[in-house]
Amino acid sequence: MHFATILLLCTGAVFFARGDPVSEGDGIHPRSPRVKRAPGDTERDCTATPPYIPPTAKDTTALLASLRQAMQTSGYFAGSIQAYIIPAGDAHLSEYISTRDKRREFISGFTGSAGTAVVTNDASGGKAALWTDSRYFLQGEQELDCNWILMKQAEEDVPTIEEWLVSELNPGGRVGVDPQLVSISTWKQYDDALQADGISLVGSSGGNLIDDIWTDRPPPSTAPLITLGLNYTGKSWEDKLTDIRGKMTETEADALVLTKLDEVAWLVNLRGSDVPFNPVFFAYAIVTADTAKLYLDMSKVTDDVRSHLQLGCTTGASCVQVAAYDTLLTAVEALAADSNIRKIWISSASTTYAVFSKSKQILDASPVMKMKSKKNPVEQQGLKNAHVRDAVAKCEYLMWLEEAVPGGSVTEISGADYLEQLRSRQRDYMGLSFPAISASGPNGAVVHYRPTEETNRAVNTEDVYLIDSGGQYRDGTTDVTRTLHFGQPTDYQRECYTLVLMGAINEFLQVFKQGTFGIRLDQAARAPLFSRGLEYGHGTGHGLGSFLNVHEDPYFGRSSGVPVGETGTFITIEPGYYEDGQFGIRLETLAMVREADTKYNFGGRTYLTFEPITLVPFSEKMIKFDMLNMDQLTWLNDYHKKVRETIGPELQRQGKNDVYDWLMKNTQPFETSRITSSGAKAVSYVFIIAFAVVCSIFST
Ligand SMILES: *[C@@H]1O[C@H](CO)[C@@H](O)[C@H](O)[C@H]1NC(C)=O
């Protein structure tokens, strides 16, 4: 899954600029008028008379009329607005959002995860447009009715939102948006561009226009919170508060406002289920030197939570108070007005414009982002344990596939469902950590693929099969990808698989300095593919939470202020290769950063390396051994030895003797004689990379 995020957050711009293979594969030419519809055609045709609207599209005519009416009469903007922007996100800029927050989906019918809608009033042309990226062009044509213009982001002649607004509105025009749903940077981007043309961006105050017309909007979640004891978190919320206050003193910040749901959940050692896949709950937190306040729906606070937080106190460094969720903005405003509060710490990258506009202050990334990326020993052990149980389910699945696929009864969806079932039988399972990417043949090349009834393919003996999935367990979050073939892979597919595997191994073989940022470690995983003129258009991996979000800092693809080079950091290593229309290969293995055992110790420094945490075998059938060098083969054999020795006993403990036999068979050491010429390859990628890393260290 990773992809969705990594791609968007880290390498999105570059990736799309180079041409997203997904869109080319779709082969959509929506602008060419089609006279006659082929039976079963799923896309809209607005040039036909009458227009062809597929049954998958939502009729938005009445809704748009209500929205335009509301734009005319609303008191939220101190005057009328000519256009209204409807972003896709929630007030915490979350990756996964609750149904209640799917406002853009409600108004347009478009269900893709990325996309922004803009509606103009009748006097300004009465248009509605939706911007999305190439992943979702086909989906847009299927789900939008003809009231909507589909703006294919980054395509030639397609304006940006700001450019379009400037062309549609007259100078003096006003564009409304809910400031609780846009980041500081997005607001600035719109505002700068519009202002330059005499148009103003106006934030609503008092409500949201979509909420007003959404009569059957789902009610807020009241799912009770769960508490996590010290045996899961390794650190009490009291100690976490002390650490945070230490950072605040260093930064001379008198108040810290936390707006990310996983940061709040981490701080107070609570979890919830308000959004899918991420075990978080709607809340904010404000910490000062002597107060800590949570803003949340009190109905979620059970007796258990009450005693966990020792609610009822009024003062003291270890006193947490609770207040209503929707009083946060007022509280931030009060802080800004308080003469004792000189500096308010809000995170620039993850805060909405609404919070910023009340505090008028901004500082760097929140301290929690960095703290929670470095797992303490209890969290490390929990993540390891969760990965052992997860590997049991995954190995069970792989063994089952080998038997079931030739029978012809497995599809992408039924396979993913079965894997979910297997996981759910493991102890402390709490749900999926993201929707599984179960992809056969060409679907594997669609990097953000998620099977639907329409795209569901058989998992067969002809095609490559990619399975990327993960679970939430009370002691850890998992995310693993393996790629397989149940018949005879082509020589080319094996070559590509081996290059991807070599990239993953190279990443694991690196030794680096404390404090190293991911971007410096990214190239090692790409080098084998590069050497044959191949590459992948996404980041090499992402951090992952301790029974929290499946995507968090740090990332290999960008420097966010959180280094990879810290012991106890968990990060996925997931190189891949995608052949448009043919197959996709990705090998994703979670790693933990630990001290390296080096011969020397220059400068008395700590040198670090990656330890594999995901323990699921690679596919022997897919490996061209003559491409590996001795270091890589040794790593592979050591890895499989660790898989046998760690997962084997757990399989026996669970009485899964058939899976145990399968595992023993699939983790046999490979003979070193299988690699043809180790001497000539002595100057391997690893050496080159080690050299490059050393050079870059000395050049800084
Ligand atoms: C942690 O402690 C709780 C409460 O005593 C217990 O129910 C749970 O099984 C423990 N979990 C682990 C992983 O030790």
Image: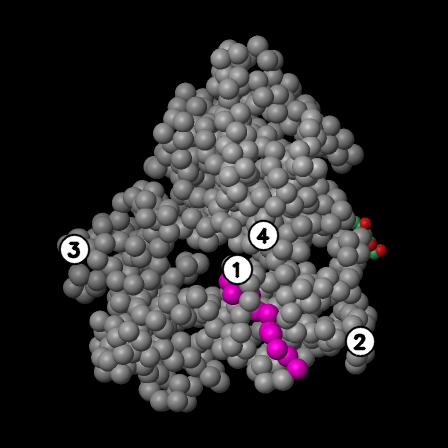
Q: Nearer the viewer, mark 1 or mark 3?
A: 1
Contact (Cβ within 8 Å) of mark 4 with mark 1: no
Disc 3 marks a residue whose amino acid type is: Pro
Q: Is residue 119 above or below residue 433?
A: below
What number is the disc on residue 316?
2
- Pointer 4 residue: 562
The first of marks 2 and 3 along the sequence is 3
Disc 1 marks a residue whose amino acid type is: Tyr
Which sits in the foreground, 289 or 464? Answer: 289
Q: Residue placed at 60% from the left, 74% from the top?
A: 343
- Pointer 1 residue: 96
Alpha carbon distance from label 4 to label 1: 22 Å
Q: State which region is magenta.
A: 340-350
Q: Is residue 348 magenta?
A: yes
Q: Nearer the viewer, mark 4 or mark 3?
A: 4
The first of marks 1 and 3 along the sequence is 3
Contact (Cβ within 8 Å) of mark 2 with mark 3: no
- Pointer 3 residue: 33
Q: Residue placed at 46% from the left, 53% from the top?
A: 9
Locate residue 195: give its quadrant: bottom left
Can residue 442 be seen here? The reply is yes
Contact (Cβ within 8 Å) of mark 4 with mark 3: no
